[in-house]
Each structure stands twice: as structure tokens, then as C-alpha cells.
Image (cartoon, helix red, strand yellow):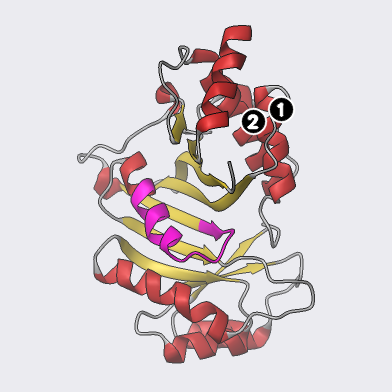
Amino acid sequence: METHTTSAKVLLNHATTLNLHTGNLVNRSRLKKKCPSSPSEEIQDCVRATLSEWFATIPPPTSPTDTIDCSIPQATEAITPEEREELKVSVKLFICEADLSSIKDAVDKACQALAVSQLDSVIIAPPALPEGESQTLDNLQPAWRELEGLVQSHKIATIGTSDLDKELLEQLYNWAQVKPSSNQVNLASCCVMPPDLTAFAKEFDIQLLTHNDPKELITAASFQEAVQESTQDLEVADWRLEWVLRYSIIVKSRGIIKAKGYLVHAKRSSL
């Protein structure tokens, strides 16, 4: 075990980028035994468990690398061409920093991990705003343009939003070239779907979905804690999250989840 811990420290001390893929959580027995109380607890558990398992199986590194690609091969299920038509690949992308190039990067990495050329649906969750600030169309436009480009290049079929009220959803709809196909609403903030939002969505064929994700899926401190616990007291304060992508693969004819997982991308801010 000491050798594995040493390997982990050598790798993380030299790396500047961490790409983590949990693999299919539906099949990971270690994580299935525990029912997380919230999405935040689930992603923190996933980061901790994936890093721990990966570090326990890797050989000592012959030479340190700038990028760590951390995944559990036996837990990862690629989609075969034969079954692709029967499956819907839905994604929610949580942007943790304002670097918009991360949107294309996240979509590309998801397509590569799942062996598909296109994601059926991507819902965007922009970075959490400072306390007291409200979301505006100006804030949303840069990310939406990135998503529109990915629709036009056939990397994504449909795009959606999260936590927009009727006024902001209408502004985005009127401005956008590629219209939002869905809008997620957090029922913790409104127990009943607002009537004006429902009416607008029905008129313009926008699907209203519910979710229970917090404004910030995982804080920097929680992420660093998960990394630290999996590597036994390694100094991790300079690691920061850039994005988290959660995917679900659904069997269309039966409506059941075949696979679910997370991709996480983090950077080290200084060396």
C-alpha cells in the first residue's frame, strides 16, 4: 500500500491536469452499497473512490507526467455502434470556471469516453454567481454560443438550460439561434412549477424537467478533501475544478438507466 501511496504522491506532485472518469456507477458495487444523501455527496464519494481504486492498481510511475487520466477500465462501458440507436445519452455540464473552451473540451471527452460521435442532450449549468447576484442574458450568451457551435458541428443534438425563470428563458429563446429544448427547475426553490413558466414552455415546446442539484455541485474545498483523503494527506490546496459532467445512458424503449457516471476535469493553479 505504501508503494501505491508513494506513486500517487509522485504523480499528483508533478501533474498540472487531472481527468477523472468514474465509469458506470450502476455497476460499481462499492458505490452502490451507499446511498448518497445529495448530488454533492455523490460526486465527492465518486472522486474519492475512483482515485483510491486507481491509485491502488497503478504501478510505480517510470516518469512523472503533466496530465493524469484516472479511470477504472472494468467499470467503463463504451457504447457499441449496434446499440447506439436504442440509447439516449443525456448530459448535464457544470461549469466551475468562466473558461468557455471547457465546454467543447467536456463534450469531446464525454464522446470519447462513451465511444459516441454525438450527445443527444446537453444541459448547461453556468458557474455559481456571487451571493446576491442574479443570472442575466449577458451572462448566458457566451456559453450558449459555444453550445450552438457544437450543435452545428453535430457533436450535440439538443441543448437545454437550468434554473431559468420565465422572463430569462423567454429572453434566451428570442435571442438564440439554436433554441433551448429543455429547462431544468429546482423544486427545492419552488414546490410547484410556476404557471407563467409552464405556459411559456408549452407554447414553445420546451420540456420542463426537475432536479435537486445545488447551485454549486461540489465546492473547491469538498473536491480537495476528496482528493486528499484518497491520497493520504497529500497537499491539494492548489488544485481547482474546471468542470464536472454527469451523464446518463437511457434505454429508450424501456426508460431505464443503463449507465450513469461523472467526468471531472481539474487543474493545478501553481507549482
Mark pair 2, 1: CA separation: 7 Å
Q: Nearer the viewer, residue 231 or 79?
A: 231
Magenta-highlighted residues:
93-109
Vertical comparison of 86 with 69: above or below = below
Q: Nearer the viewer, residue 1 or 251?
A: 1
Residue 92 in the figure: left or right of residue 127: left
Amino acid at the residue labelled 2: Arg
**Badge 1: how crowded within 10 Å, few (<14), some, or many (20+)?**
some
Q: Does residue 94 show up magenta in the picture? A: yes
Extreme residue toward the right, this view:
132
Q: Which residue is mark 2?
A: 48
Residue visible at 68% across and 58% down in the picture: 216
Q: Nearer the viewer, residue 269 or 112?
A: 269
Residue 106 in the figure: left or right of residue 195: left
Label 2 secondary element: helix
Q: Are marks 2 and 1 in contact (CB under 8 Å)?
A: yes
Q: Does residue 12 show up magenta in the picture? A: no
Q: Nearer the viewer, residue 42 or 128?
A: 128
**Badge 2: how crowded within 10 Å, few (<14), some, or many (20+)?**
many
Extreme residue toward the front, this view:
271
Which label sits in the foreground, 2 or 1? 1
How far across and how far down the image is residue 65, in percent?
Answer: 42, 30
Residue 196 in the figure: left or right of residue 118: right
Amino acid at the residue labelled 1: Glu
Q: Quadrant of the C terminus?
A: top right
Q: Is residue 34 at least partly visible in the picture?
A: no
Residue visible at 50% across and 27% down in the picture: 27
Image mark for residue 229: 1
Label 1 secondary element: helix
